[in-house]
Amino acid sequence: MVSSKDVAKRAGVSQSTVSRVLNNPSKVSKTNVEKVVRAMEELNYRPNSIARSLVSKKTKTIALISGPLHNPFFVETTTSIVNYAKEKGYNTTVFFEKGDNMSVYESVLKHQVDGIILSSIFMDDPIYAELEKLDIPVMMFNRKCRRGGNYVEVDNFRAGKMATEHLLKLGHERIGFIGGPLYTSTFYGRYQGYVEALKRYGHEADRTLIRDTDTSESGVRDAVLTLMGRKNKPSAIFAATDSIAIFAIDTLKELGYDIPRDVSICGMDNINIARHRSFELTTVGQKSEKNLGQLGIEHLFRMIESGGKGEEPVQMTLEPVLYERKTTAAPK
């Protein structure tokens, strides 16, 4: 089997130079890159398409780090991103959020790509420092890092406040909150909006009505069972995503509750299925016909096509809007 040592010998360079060409060609002279690529082609060390990409420094590939697919929001955004990249002649390598995000990022950083778009990042994520060092554009969507960078999001604080105020205006006083990890900007902002709305209406946030979950169906089910098992159960629930809302509705119906006669539910994201006749979910979305993944990938390609990260970061925060449908009503 041909090794990098054989490539180095054929090219007349050191083995470390071959390694740099494979991992960071921008740090190697054009002459040496061409020597190594030529040797790789002659020895069939790697496919010609990959070898040529090292000369042009373009792989025609982007990396997407997405949230979990049990949330339809990420199914929709992943589809938009992959399709848009395909229209641009690019392949998309997709990675999905796991419990150990660091292993996902390590896999991404091993790939040579022309740009990264991601929704899986924490507010104080240590990986952000590594992303900043890359010579390629990085775009966040739905979530953002406290340190800044390029991102497209909805105003999560205002969205959480809007959803909760809608329930308060209907006359609900005991309003539950089911969300996800508060170390992410989405859930933290929506939770803070929920707390602020309660405060404005003269209510203190009741910790017994607040449940943080892993956002999975089983996690949401446990949260609903806990909330509805209390003596003073909520008459309404603000679910911090539409996915959580749908899982919650399934569990509530299983328990014999009628929606919205017994319990009102307001979601967040305005995913496509929320409009379906079987749900007609009251929810909060953004004032844009394009989802956040679509907006994010369009900005990423503007940076790729302009040849860099851009002088000023792209930081887009969209205004939220309430979509009142059939899962909320005045308490009985």
Image (cartoon, rainbow, N blue to C red):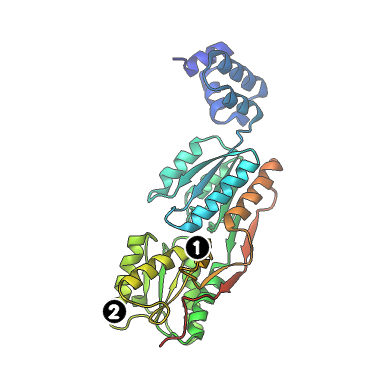
Res. 152 in view? yes
Which residue lies at the image location 62% right of the left edge and 46% below the top edge?
84
Percent x, y for residue 20? Answer: 55, 27
Which residue lies at the image location 59% right of the left edge and 19% below the top edge?
36
Percent x, y for residue 151? Answer: 59, 56
User: In which quadrant of the rendered view does residue 252 lie?
Assistant: bottom left
Q: Is residue 15 above or below residue 152?
A: above
Q: Nearer the viewer, residue 164 or 24?
A: 164
Q: Is residue 73 left or right of residue 54?
A: left
User: In which quadrant of the rendered view does residue 131 lie?
Assistant: top right
- The amino acid type of the residue labelled 1 equals Ile
Res. 123 in view? no
Distance Cα–Cα, label 2 vs label 1: 30 Å
Which class describes the residues within 10 Å of circle 1: few (<14), some (14-19), or many (20+)? Answer: some
Does label 2 or label 1 sit earlier along the sequence?
2
Q: Nearer the viewer, residue 86 or 179?
A: 86
Quadrant of the image containing the C terminus: bottom left
Quadrant of the image containing the N terminus: top left
SS of the residue under disc 1: helix
- The amino acid type of the residue labelled 2 equals Arg
Q: Pointer 1: what residue?
A: 273
Q: Are marks 2 and 1 in contact (CB under 8 Å)?
A: no
Q: Is residue 278 above or below residue 61?
A: below
Which class describes the residues within 10 Å of circle 2: few (<14), some (14-19), or many (20+)? Answer: few
Percent x, y for residue 170? Answer: 49, 85
Q: Nearer the viewer, residue 137 or 326?
A: 326
Which residue lies at the image location 53% right of the left edge and 12% below the top edge?
9
SS of the residue under disc 2: loop
Percent x, y for residue 228? Answer: 31, 76
Q: Pointer 2: what residue?
A: 230
